[in-house]
Image (spheres, rainbow, N blue to C red):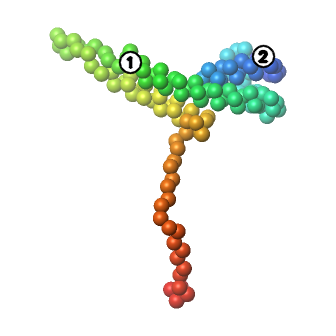
Amino acid sequence: MAMAGVSTYTEEIALRICERLADGESLKAMCEDEDMPSKSTVFKWLSENPAFSDMYARAREAQADALFDDVLSIADDGRNDWMQRNFGEDTRWVENGEALRRSQLRIDARKWMAGKLRPKKYGDKLDVEHSGQLVTIAKDAADL
């Protein structure tokens, strides 16, 4: 839990917050450390300090890149994809469905967060194409 005494803004704490965000850590998790301010204190600093607010915004963009990199690491990590199961006297390797579902959940959460943090880079893109001619429909006064 964050100490109530860590409430004075310093450049050192601001840099640590932004570095940890850029590495992919959540603000909630870091603010639980004893030597860090509470989330409400960080939000207060953001509203009062434009330089910190700019640095924080850049750190959030970098966080999206870190989350995107995590997606590849998780997808490539097959260490827990298979497990040994005993079937009577036979032992076989079977797919570890729980680990595969957890990996997919971790990937989906990171893709969603990256898309929210940097929508132009990682957000879903909608291609809207309209072909054909514009038709104007005028109602006849008699149809009213």
Res. 11 in view: yes
Is residue 106 or residue 28 the one in the foreground? 106
x and y, in percent, of residue 15 in the image: 74, 19
Q: Which mark is residue 78?
A: 1
- Image coordinates for residue 41, horizontal then vertical, percent: 76, 27
Q: How many marks?
A: 2
Q: Quadrant of the N terminus?
A: top right
Looking at the image, the residue that sits furthest to the bottom is 142
Mark-to-mark CA distance, 2 and 1 = 39 Å
Which type of secondary structure does the marked residue at label 2 adopt? Answer: helix
- Of the numbered discs 2 and 1, the one sitting upstream in the chain is 2
Residue 47's disc is: none
Q: Which residue is mark 2?
A: 12
Residue at point 34% right, 25% down? Answer: 97
> In screen coordinates, is 78 left or right of 84?
right
Whether residue 40 appears in this view of the structure is no
Identified by mark 2, the residue type is Glu
Residue under the point 58% across and 24% down: 66
Q: Position of residue 46 (x, y in %)?
A: 77, 31
Percent coordinates x, y for residue 70 in the rendering? 52, 23
Q: Secondary structure at mark 1?
A: loop
